[in-house]
Amino acid sequence: KSEWYFTLIERLPGLLLVGFAIFIVLISIGWIFTKRMSEIKKLVILSKMPFINTFVKDFISFSLAQEWSNLFLQGLEMKEVSLLMSNLESSGFMKEIGTQMKRDVLRGISFEEQVSNLAFIHEDLAIIIFSGDAKGKLGEELSFYAKICCEEMIYRMEKYMQFIQPVVFLFVALVILGVYASIMLPLYANMGGILQ
């Protein structure tokens, strides 16, 4: 009756290796598929994925709010901010957002409307921009919002780590137990055959 258990334990290292190989293949396919996409499209996809969508939105909202607050506190206007972002040397999401904002500024679209059209940030960033613009304290409001985003991101990470850490330890323990059993069980079976 317990033969299936011994068979599973003997094959566990191989099954784990196959599972790990499938995981690597899936990650590679995803990387190849998204390699040709723009940074904005990648962010839209990531912001819709379960488990990581809140982290993506937190990080992007924090990054943009922090960057914009620094620029607005230096006295720059929206047109200058979009021009600076679009001329960044790195080809990351900031440059693409800056290029898109530069186009929207030329079309006469307000900053608040531009931000509300970004699907990969929190909706309340547009509200912060509207209230900060109305008060004339946009830089200060964005700086305060960036601090809140950072605190929320850290809180969520700690919360997820409280769940993930025991799961990882359990998985590692099962792998060690499986490897140990796959080595020792055949020895015990042979010893039992010798004693008989």
Image (tube, rainbow, N blue to C red):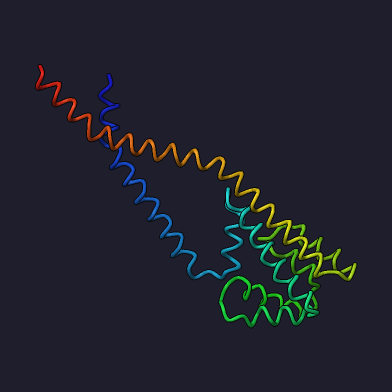
Please identify the quarter of the rendering in which residue 70 is found.
bottom right
Residue at coordinates 27% horizontally, 32% vertically from top-left? 181
The spot of residue 76 in percent (x, y) is 78, 80
Q: Is residue 6 above or below residue 36?
A: above
Q: Please state, as top left, top right, bottom left or bottom right, where the C terminus lies in the image.
A: top left
Q: Is residue 84 above or below residue 18?
A: below
62 or 120: nearer the viewer:
62
Query: From the viewer's perspective, is 97 left or right of 79?
Result: left
2 or 109: nearer the viewer:
2
116 or 191: nearer the viewer:
191
Residue at coordinates 28% horizontally, 21% vertically from top-left? 2
The spot of residue 113 in percent (x, y) is 78, 67
The spot of residue 65 in percent (x, y) is 72, 66
Residue at coordinates 28% horizontally, 26% vertically from top-left? 4
Q: Please state, as top left, top right, bottom left or bottom right, where the N terminus lies in the image.
A: top left
- Count of numbered marks: 0
Furthest residue to the top? 196
Query: From the viewer's perspective, is 177 left or right of 53?
Result: left
Q: Is residue 160 above or below residue 127?
A: above
Q: Is residue 7 above or below residue 56?
A: above
Please identify the quarter of the rendering in which residue 100 is found.
bottom right
